[in-house]
Image: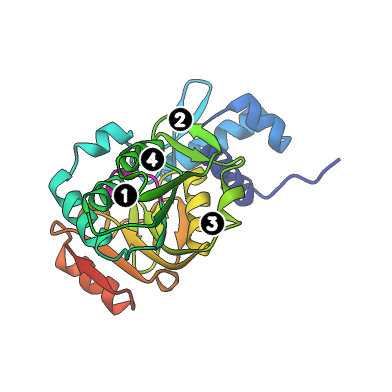
């Protein structure tokens, strides 16, 4: 019989499973870790007290540092003017003939709109895992070539994730990648509330010559479950005027160049 995992390690792996699926049943966790339902409930209660998950009838859902993941439409209503300015600042970094990886999200959607509005851009290839972003870019065809990664659809963000989303990304090397996130912190690094999307963001980062993180000011100083990169692994952060000066200063002191749009 397999030796049971230590409680701390078991809970860590339970949290990872819950993060990937968004929800897990007590019975499924019991089967996966070969422990009793009573032990699983005790583990989930402990994780709930740590604010990592929220207990629901029959199982648990990811809490992710006391928050839930907003849908694309909900996020679209938040900080719209700030995201527009971030989008314009990021789009200004793209030169004609460039190849661009454009992550999913409302801030990166603002980059897509700003790219389309630049009449001077031609011969640009944009690769994205966001269906909404691909539709934004459609207006720029044939000036732009728009490539969608493929993969498994996540309806909350209209994003394409694993399995299969990384197949194309691992075969390209773009000039620049714009990566969205839900947290940027000097110690915690660049993080995201959703694990499947965090996984793909890491692949995007490795598939580009230069990776630029884009995040409205409210995301600075926060850390979430899915680690994307350490501060030193990204070239620059573009944020907005709602960013607290203390958060911006801390990131700059950690060695990350920050543009406040």
- Asked whether disc 3 touches disc 4, contact meaning CB atoms under 8 Å apart, the reply is no
Front residue (pair 25, 192):
192
Q: How far is disc 3 from disc 4 in space, using C-alphas?
A: 19 Å
Q: Nearer the viewer, mark 2 or mark 1?
A: 1
Q: Position of residue 63 (x, y in %)?
A: 40, 38
Front residue (pair 210, 157):
210
49 sits left or right of 17 in the view: left
Determine which residue is flagged by label 4.
134
Dot 3: element: helix
Determine which residue is flagged by label 3.
203
Q: Nearer the viewer, mark 1 or mark 4?
A: 4
Q: Earlier in the sequence, mark 3 or mark 1?
A: 1
Q: Earlier in the sequence, mark 3 or mark 4?
A: 4
Q: Earlier in the sequence, mark 2 or mark 3?
A: 2
Q: Quadrant of residue 213?
A: bottom left
Q: How far is disc 1 from disc 4 in space, using C-alphas?
A: 11 Å
Q: Is residue 30 magenta?
A: no
Q: Which mark is residue 55?
A: 2
Seen from this angle, which residue lies furthest top? Answer: 57
Name the residue rendered at 67%, 50% in the picture: 6
Dot 2: element: strand
Depicted 129 relative to depicted 90: above or below: above
Q: What's the magenta bit mostly, secondary-structure-wise?
A: loop
Determine which residue is flagged by label 1.
108
Crowd band around label 3 with a 10 angstrom C-alpha radius: few (<14), some (14–19), many (20+):
some
Q: Position of residue 53 (x, y in %)?
A: 45, 38
């Amino acid at each position: 019989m397999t030796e049971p995992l230590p409680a701390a390690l078991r809970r860590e792996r339970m949290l990872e499973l819950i993060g990937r699926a968004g929800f897990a049943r007590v019975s499924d966790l019991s089967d996966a870790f070969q422990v009793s339902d009573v032990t699983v409930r005790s583990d989930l209660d402990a994780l709930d007290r740590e604010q990592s998950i929220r207990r629901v009838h029959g199982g648990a859902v990811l809490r992710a540092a006391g928050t839930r993941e907003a849908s694309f439409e909900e996020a679209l209503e938040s900080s719209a003017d700030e995201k527009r300015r971030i989008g314009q600042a990021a789009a200004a970094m793209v030169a004609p003939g460039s190849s661009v990886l454009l992550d999913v999200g409302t801030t990166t959607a603002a980059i897509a709109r700003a790219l389309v509005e630049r009449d001077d851009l031609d011969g640009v290839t944009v690769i994205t895992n966001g269906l909404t972003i691909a539709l934004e870019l459609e207006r720029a065809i044939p000036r732009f070539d728009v490539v969608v990664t493929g993969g498994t659809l996540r309806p909350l963000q209209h994003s394409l994730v694993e399995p299969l989303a990384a197949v194309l990304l691992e075969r390209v090397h773009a000039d620049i990648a714009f990566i969205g996130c839900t947290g940027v912190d000097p110690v915690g690094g660049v993080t995201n509330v959703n694990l499947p999307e965090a996984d793909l963001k890491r692949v995007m980062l490795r598939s580009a010559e230069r990776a630029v993180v884009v995040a409205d000011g409210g995301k600075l100083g926060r850390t979430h479950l899915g680690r994307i990169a350490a501060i030193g692994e990204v070239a620059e952060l573009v944020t907005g005027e709602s960013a607290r000066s203390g958060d911006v200063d801390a990131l700059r002191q950690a060695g990350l160049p920050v543009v406040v749009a």
